[in-house]
Amino acid sequence: MDSRNEQAEELLWRAQESEQRIRLILETALDAVVTMNSAGQITGWNAEAERIFGWSHEEAVGGRMSDTIIPPQHREAHERGLQRFLETGEGPVLNRRIEITALHRTGREFPVELAISPAKVGDTWTFSAFLRDISERRQADEAREAANRTKNEFLLLQEADKLQKALLNSVSHNLRTPLASVLGALNSVLEDGALLDAPTKQSLLKTAQEEARRLDLLVQNLLDMTRLEGGAIRVKAEPCDVHDVVGAALYQLGETAQNRAISVAIAPDLPLVPMDDALIVQVLVNMLDNALKYSPGDAPIDIEAQLDTGQLEIRVLDRGRGIPEQELERVFEKFFRVALPGAPKGAGLGLSICKGFVEAHNGRILAKRRTQGGTELAFFLPLEAKRE
């Protein structure tokens, strides 16, 4: 009998020691540890819980969990979730880490990281909640996000300043040449008209007209780039006939296109394609202008349009010197100009604008070297309008 008593006493002592050890661990835990019974009452409340929630152990134990640390707007959901678990054994927030809002004694809400573990002893459920105040982490995250936003805004301002300077440089250098040609031709006609024969006058006026067209295209590109950089491009897609779009681009190029051999091959039975025709006409104008400038005057230029794997493909092919392989990826960058001896001057905006307009349609654009010489510029548009 004495032996049994001794064994029982030893088991009781070990159980008490284990309980004390567990209590010590809970009391010194870095996380708040709150336990609750199946009735929703708090049965355990460690020192860290006292610190982050403001309630003492004596004040918290025995109170309802929902009334003590759960914000009013979440209490009904908590009670429903507890009841559902007791009826079905299912709980979507159990045994996983989540981030929620908790309630301080003062009524202040703050973010916590929460993990809840259920345990059944006999017929009774006990729920252990491990909570960590993540206010400082949230503040650090918000500060980091704010710093990133500030950095991005600074980079955008830098880019805008760079663009502004480049645009001003472009205006001062690239507008001056065609403007001087227009003024020179018109002054000659006005001041020396009586001494000039008809063919000379006609030649001067054509020069003025052509340079004015160049001036207009450059100004249009400057305006388009400003709209792109400012996020002011809004695609108004309507079903369009590809024949009309190509024709409008050639018309805008005027005599420059009329004096060159330009062939147009549009696949039969092309459907109407959703696009903002004003933007895509400008894309074609810039691509054709590039082909006209970088190929010999007697070299033909081809425009081809067809369907390609459910997309509209439009290609402009020239027979010029071609773009060096290492520069193909850069031709769509702002202010980039191919470094070729005797290459025409320009602002380096045309193809960059093409890229912006095409991508605004959810399309893509590319440049290739042709095996027989020259350059191929192609863009692809989806047959369904981009959904905003």
Image (cartoon, rainbow, N blue to C red):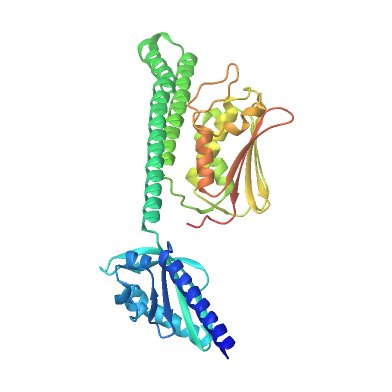
Picture residue at 57% right of the left edge, 30% below the top: 290
Q: Position of residue 195 (x, y in %)?
A: 41, 8
- In the picture as drawn, the residue positioned furthest to the front comes out as 2
The reply to whether residue 247 is visible in this rendering is: yes
User: Which image quarter: residue 324?
Assistant: top right
Q: In this picture, is 139 found above or below 347?
A: below
Picture residue at 51% right of the left edge, 81% below the top: 12
- In the picture as drawn, the residue positioned furthest to the top comes out as 195
Q: Position of residue 32 (x, y in %)?
A: 40, 67
Q: In this picture, is 28 found above or below 366?
A: below
Camera-side residue: 150 or 21? 21
Camera-side residue: 73 or 240? 73
Q: Position of residue 278 (x, y in %)?
A: 48, 44
Camera-side residue: 60 or 254? 60
The reply to whether residue 77 is visible in this rendering is: no
In this figure, what is the number of numbered marks?
0
Left or right relative to 187: residue 337: right
Quarter holding the N terminus is bottom right
Left or right relative to 287: residue 79: left
Q: In this picture, is 327 found above or below 53?
A: above
- In the picture as drawn, the residue positioned furthest to the left comes out as 106
Q: In this picture, is 95 found above or below 376?
A: below
Q: Position of residue 193 (x, y in %)?
A: 39, 12
Left or right relative to 5: residue 39: left
Left or right relative to 322: residue 208: left
Picture residue at 43% right of the left edge, 34% below the top: 220
Camera-side residue: 134 or 201? 134
Picture residue at 64% right of the left edge, 28% below the top: 326
